[in-house]
Image (cartoon, helix red, strand yellow):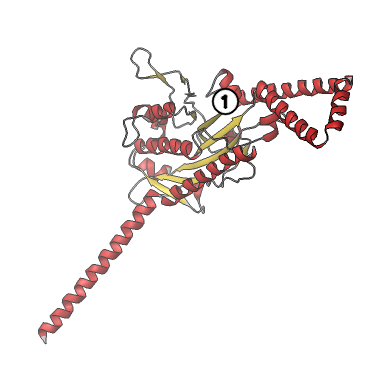
Amino acid sequence: MVISIRKKAEITSSQIVAIILVILGFAIILFVYYQLSWTGMVDREVCHQSVIYRGTSQYLTGTTSYVPLNCKTDKVCITSGILGGSCKEFENVKGVAKLKVKNKDEIEQFIARDIIDCWQTMGEGKISIFSNFLADKYGLGTVYPSCVICTRIAFDNESLAKAKINLEDVNVVRYMMTHAIPDTNVSYYNYLSGEKAKFSVNRQLDLKEIVIDPQSGKVAEGGSISFETGSISEQNNNTNAELSVLFMQISAPSHTGVLKNTLQTIGIGYGASFLLSPVMVTKATVGALTSPWAWAIAIIGGAYQQYSVASNRAISAGYCGDVSVGTDARDGCSVVRTTNYDVNEISKYCSVIESIP
């Protein structure tokens, strides 16, 4: 009888141990899931697919307006400590991921990775995502920059201060130049340069401007970096509690491109009309060619069209001048910008935002 009681006690103890192990394992899985923020990774993939679909529709229909973007802005609170704290900017906001860091390098690494992830998600500048059909094709109307805000980043200053992490020491550009992407021998900077990416970091977190010393080829203090695929400048702006990583795109047609599209459209329309009613179209053509009013309208219309193209190319240069030069800036640009999450700051680069808040 005593033996039976001991066996029952042993079985009960092993069950308790098993239950505890299961609970601990489940807690670890939840912790890893929370830290990796898989939901954000899934959202980025959904966004990327919608970008591909919209880019495909551009080739099929000539416009992107029929395919909505499904890009949700990630929200990240950077904190520190065993349990981490919270960011007041995201108070009562759902879907916020916490990133617990031990030093400033981890902050720099996260922002650098997010810049690349945003660039890749939005098609690496190879896809025309935003379309202003009449302005792009015929030079009619005004072009404007459109954006997707990939990430909002806030900082838990209290916990970061306790961990002796000074945000003023954070320098994203320096990190991108001096660190390789994980599992590669390529730096963040060289990767983006190789991909002909354009990116701009404009944030109070980076107080010092960076240049490459032409003698040593190493990073030196003072000035700004200018390179073939873009330019980076670190500016001392007013401190803002929140940071945004956004993708901006704007394009402007060329003078010859607009003329070519116009003549093609007229030719197609004329050909179709001639097939339906050759006699009537022939008479109308002869009448138009011999009418001074028709010629005046054509000249005025053409002059207006070319003036509109020139104006749009100037607008494009205004938005792209910090990352491109000359003709490239006037053609437009696709660029990842890191700016303060502020209406006035973002409105400098974005006329329309198509991401989901």
Q: Position of residue 150 (x, y in %)?
A: 50, 41
Q: Is residue 64 left or right of residue 84?
A: right
Q: Position of residue 161 (x, y in %)?
A: 38, 40
Q: Nearer the viewer, residue 190 or 53?
A: 53
Q: Is residue 312 left or right of residue 180?
A: right
Q: Which residue is mark 1?
A: 320
Under circle 1, the secondary element is helix
Q: Is residue 242 visible to the viewer in this orientation of the structure?
A: no
Q: Is residue 24 visible to the viewer in this orientation of the structure?
A: yes
Q: Is residue 201 above or below residue 57?
A: above
Q: Is residue 168 left or right of residue 324?
A: left
Q: Is residue 49 above or below residue 293?
A: below
Task: Tally the numbered discs.
Answer: 1
Q: Is residue 302 left or right of residue 225?
A: right
Asked where in the image residue 333 lies, by quadrant, the reply is top right
Residue at the farthest top position: 215
Q: Nearer the viewer, residue 327 or 315?
A: 327
> What residue is drawn where x is 15% and y is 83%?
5
Asked where in the image residue 347 lies, by quadrant, the reply is top right
Mark 1 nearby-residue class (10 Å; few <14, some 14–19, many ≥20): many
Residue at the farthest bottom position: 1
Q: Amino acid at mark 1?
A: Cys
> What residue is drawn where x is 47% and y is 42%?
153
Quadrant position of the N terminus in the picture: bottom left
> What residue is drawn where x is 88% and y is 19%?
292
Q: Position of residue 31 (x, y in %)?
A: 35, 55
Q: Position of residue 354 (x, y in %)?
A: 59, 42
Q: Is residue 55 above or below residue 232?
A: below
